[in-house]
Amino acid sequence: MSTLNLRARIAQVLEPMRAGRGQGVDPLADLDRSVADPRDRALARAMLYACLRGIYRYERWLDVLRERPLPRAARVVDAVLLLALASLDQGIDAEHAIVSGSVDAIRQLRQPGFAGLGNA
């Protein structure tokens, strides 16, 4: 069982999808296996689908909000931020939970230098 929070796990699924990697594999199967609670699996799918439905809009918003693009090695941070924007836009979770979960996810994904972006 992974020690990553739900947002970090979803970001690990979203990032390669955005980059066009992982074609021919079922990323949701891996996500489902790593999330034991069926309620958490449903929430994970809701967050991922909401993000994917509006991905172009959320990417534009993120481009406007960021001062400059993140380095290639930190692309998973963009995935966390996109999930946060989608969750806020779609009212999937409480604002404080989205911010806190996003900051935690960024730290858990070994990108602590970018944790402030989760608060922003």
Image (cartoon, grey):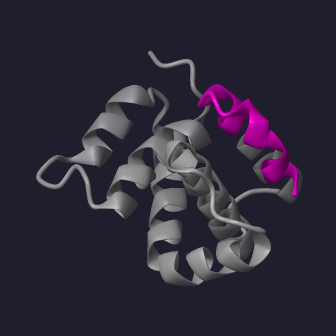
Residue under the image location 77 percent in, 52 percent down: 98
Q: Position of residue 83 (x, y in %)?
A: 60, 59
108 within the magenta span: yes
Residue 1 falls in image quadrant: top left
Left or right, 69 with respect to 1, comes to: right
Q: Position of residue 47 (x, y in %)?
A: 55, 59
Q: Position of residue 109 (x, y in %)?
A: 59, 31
Residue under the image location 54 percent in, 40 percent down: 40
**Between 13 and 43, the one nearer to me in the picture:** 13
Q: Position of residue 89 (x, y in %)?
A: 71, 75
Residue under the image location 61 percent in, 63 percent down: 82
Left or right, 61 with respect to 73, comes to: right
Q: As displayed, is residue 94 above or below residue 12?
A: below
Name the chief secondary structure element in magenta.
Answer: helix
Residue 101 falls in image quadrant: top right
Q: Classify the position of the C terminus by image quarter.
A: bottom right
Left or right, 105 with respect to 10, comes to: right
Residue under the image location 46 percent in, 77 percent down: 53
The outermost residue toward the left is 24
**Between 120 and 69, the one nearer to me in the picture:** 69
Instruction: Give the total number of marks visible in the rendering.
Output: 0
Q: As displayed, is residue 84 above or below residue 77?
A: below
Q: As displayed, is residue 55 above or below residue 105?
A: below
Magenta stretch bounds: 104-120
Residue 65 falls in image quadrant: bottom right
92 within the magenta span: no
Q: As displayed, is residue 4 above or below residue 63?
A: above
